[in-house]
Image (spheres, rainbow, N blue to C red):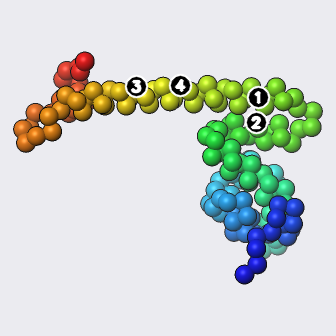
Amino acid sequence: MSAAPQRSELPSPVQIGEAARLAGVSAKMVRHYESLGLLGGVQRTDSGYRLYGQADVHRLRFIRRSRELGFSMPEIAELLGLWGNQERTSASVKRIAQQHVDELSRRIAAMQAMQRSLQQLLQCCSGDERPECPILDDLAGLHEVG
Protein backbone atom coordinates (compact mmCIF):
# COMPACT_ATOMS: atom_id res chain seq x y z
CA MET A 1 0.00 0.00 0.00
CA SER A 2 1.45 3.38 -0.96
CA ALA A 3 1.83 6.22 1.50
CA ALA A 4 -0.50 9.22 1.33
CA PRO A 5 0.84 11.97 -0.88
CA GLN A 6 2.66 14.79 0.88
CA ARG A 7 0.97 18.17 0.88
CA SER A 8 3.02 19.32 -2.09
CA GLU A 9 2.57 16.06 -4.01
CA LEU A 10 -1.21 15.89 -4.26
CA PRO A 11 -2.29 14.10 -7.40
CA SER A 12 -4.69 16.51 -8.98
CA PRO A 13 -7.58 16.41 -9.38
CA VAL A 14 -9.06 13.89 -6.93
CA GLN A 15 -12.62 12.90 -6.19
CA ILE A 16 -14.40 13.83 -3.00
CA GLY A 17 -13.57 10.68 -1.04
CA GLU A 18 -9.85 11.04 -1.67
CA ALA A 19 -9.89 14.78 -0.96
CA ALA A 20 -11.73 14.11 2.29
CA ARG A 21 -9.25 11.40 3.29
CA LEU A 22 -6.25 13.61 2.51
CA ALA A 23 -7.74 16.48 4.50
CA GLY A 24 -8.84 14.32 7.44
CA VAL A 25 -12.55 15.09 7.15
CA SER A 26 -15.59 13.16 5.93
CA ALA A 27 -17.03 13.51 2.44
CA LYS A 28 -20.24 14.73 4.09
CA MET A 29 -18.29 17.58 5.71
CA VAL A 30 -16.64 18.45 2.39
CA ARG A 31 -20.10 18.83 0.85
CA HIS A 32 -21.22 20.86 3.87
CA TYR A 33 -18.23 23.22 3.64
CA GLU A 34 -18.86 23.59 -0.07
CA SER A 35 -22.53 24.45 0.58
CA LEU A 36 -21.40 27.15 3.03
CA GLY A 37 -19.18 28.68 0.36
CA LEU A 38 -15.94 27.84 2.18
CA LEU A 39 -14.58 26.12 -0.91
CA GLY A 40 -14.32 27.96 -4.20
CA GLY A 41 -15.95 26.73 -7.36
CA VAL A 42 -15.25 23.02 -7.35
CA GLN A 43 -14.63 21.40 -10.72
CA ARG A 44 -17.05 18.74 -11.93
CA THR A 45 -16.63 15.94 -14.39
CA ASP A 46 -19.05 15.59 -17.29
CA SER A 47 -20.94 13.06 -15.20
CA GLY A 48 -21.18 15.49 -12.26
CA TYR A 49 -18.51 14.11 -9.92
CA ARG A 50 -16.72 16.74 -7.85
CA LEU A 51 -12.98 17.12 -8.48
CA TYR A 52 -10.67 18.70 -5.91
CA GLY A 53 -7.22 20.11 -6.46
CA GLN A 54 -4.33 20.72 -4.13
CA ALA A 55 -5.63 24.15 -3.10
CA ASP A 56 -9.01 22.63 -2.17
CA VAL A 57 -7.37 20.01 0.05
CA HIS A 58 -5.28 22.74 1.73
CA ARG A 59 -8.46 24.73 2.40
CA LEU A 60 -10.11 21.63 3.84
CA ARG A 61 -7.13 21.09 6.15
CA PHE A 62 -7.30 24.73 7.18
CA ILE A 63 -11.01 24.36 7.94
CA ARG A 64 -10.45 21.11 9.88
CA ARG A 65 -7.74 22.67 12.05
CA SER A 66 -9.86 25.77 12.63
CA ARG A 67 -12.76 23.57 13.74
CA GLU A 68 -10.42 21.64 16.07
CA LEU A 69 -9.64 24.98 17.73
CA GLY A 70 -13.34 25.73 18.06
CA PHE A 71 -13.70 28.56 15.58
CA SER A 72 -17.24 29.12 14.28
CA MET A 73 -18.07 28.83 10.60
CA PRO A 74 -18.32 32.63 10.17
CA GLU A 75 -14.93 33.01 11.87
CA ILE A 76 -13.48 30.32 9.62
CA ALA A 77 -14.87 32.08 6.56
CA GLU A 78 -13.23 35.31 7.69
CA LEU A 79 -9.94 33.54 8.44
CA LEU A 80 -10.00 31.85 5.03
CA GLY A 81 -10.50 35.24 3.43
CA LEU A 82 -7.54 36.62 5.32
CA TRP A 83 -5.42 33.56 4.52
CA GLY A 84 -5.96 34.15 0.83
CA ASN A 85 -5.42 37.91 1.03
CA GLN A 86 -1.81 38.95 0.59
CA GLU A 87 -2.78 42.50 1.64
CA ARG A 88 -3.98 41.36 5.08
CA THR A 89 -2.44 42.47 8.32
CA SER A 90 -1.56 40.03 11.05
CA ALA A 91 -3.48 42.34 13.41
CA SER A 92 -6.69 41.31 11.61
CA VAL A 93 -5.98 37.67 12.24
CA LYS A 94 -4.92 38.28 15.83
CA ARG A 95 -8.15 40.20 16.50
CA ILE A 96 -10.25 37.19 15.44
CA ALA A 97 -8.12 34.79 17.48
CA GLN A 98 -8.27 37.06 20.55
CA GLN A 99 -12.07 37.33 20.29
CA HIS A 100 -12.23 33.55 20.11
CA VAL A 101 -9.97 33.14 23.16
CA ASP A 102 -12.15 35.64 25.07
CA GLU A 103 -15.29 33.66 24.13
CA LEU A 104 -13.62 30.39 25.18
CA SER A 105 -12.72 31.97 28.52
CA ARG A 106 -16.37 33.01 29.05
CA ARG A 107 -17.58 29.52 28.19
CA ILE A 108 -15.01 27.89 30.47
CA ALA A 109 -16.05 30.16 33.35
CA ALA A 110 -19.72 29.28 32.76
CA MET A 111 -18.91 25.57 32.71
CA GLN A 112 -16.87 25.89 35.91
CA ALA A 113 -19.86 27.60 37.56
CA MET A 114 -22.09 24.71 36.41
CA GLN A 115 -19.58 22.25 37.81
CA ARG A 116 -19.51 24.04 41.19
CA SER A 117 -23.32 24.04 41.32
CA LEU A 118 -23.51 20.35 40.53
CA GLN A 119 -20.82 19.52 43.07
CA GLN A 120 -22.79 21.44 45.69
CA LEU A 121 -25.93 19.49 44.76
CA LEU A 122 -24.04 16.22 44.99
CA GLN A 123 -22.88 17.10 48.50
CA CYS A 124 -26.49 17.76 49.53
CA CYS A 125 -27.73 14.42 48.18
CA SER A 126 -27.47 11.48 50.55
CA GLY A 127 -27.67 9.03 47.65
CA ASP A 128 -29.56 6.49 49.78
CA GLU A 129 -32.79 4.54 49.38
CA ARG A 130 -35.06 7.45 50.32
CA PRO A 131 -37.03 9.17 47.55
CA GLU A 132 -36.06 12.70 48.63
CA CYS A 133 -33.57 14.13 46.18
CA PRO A 134 -32.20 17.66 46.46
CA ILE A 135 -30.82 17.38 42.92
CA LEU A 136 -34.27 16.82 41.44
CA ASP A 137 -35.75 19.46 43.75
CA ASP A 138 -33.21 21.99 42.51
CA LEU A 139 -33.82 21.09 38.87
CA ALA A 140 -37.55 21.53 39.48
CA GLY A 141 -36.88 24.91 41.13
CA LEU A 142 -38.30 23.79 44.47
CA HIS A 143 -35.40 25.18 46.51
CA GLU A 144 -31.99 26.68 46.13
CA VAL A 145 -28.88 25.03 47.45
CA GLY A 146 -26.35 27.05 49.21
Mark sitting earlier along the chain (3/4) = 4
User: Relative to 102, is 12 on the left or the right?
Assistant: right
Residue, disc 1 = 94
What is the CA distance from the residue labelled 3 to the residue labelled 2?
A: 32 Å
Direction bottom: furthest residue: 1
Residue 52, percent across and down? 80, 63
What is the CA distance from the residue labelled 4 to the residue labelled 1?
A: 18 Å
Q: Nearer the viewer, residue 28 or 54?
A: 54
Residue, disc 3 = 113
Residue, disc 2 = 78
User: Relative to 93, is 101 on the left or the right?
Assistant: left
Residue, disc 4 = 106
Find numbered disc 2 in the image and state the secondary structure of the residue it sits on: helix
Residue 27, percent across and down? 65, 63
Residue 56 visible somewhere in the drawing: yes
Find numbered disc 4 in the image and state the secondary structure of the residue it sits on: helix
Choose mark 2 or mark 4, whichever is in front. Answer: 4
Instruction: Determine the image quadrant of residue 77.
Output: top right
User: Relative to 92, is 87 on the left or the right?
Assistant: right
User: Relative to 9, is 68 on the left or the right?
Assistant: left
Q: Of the residues shown, which amino acid type is indicated by label 2? A: Glu
Q: Which mark is residue 60?
A: none
For the C terminus, give its image quadrant.
Answer: top left
Residue 142, percent across and down? 18, 23
Q: Is residue 74 above or below residue 65?
A: above
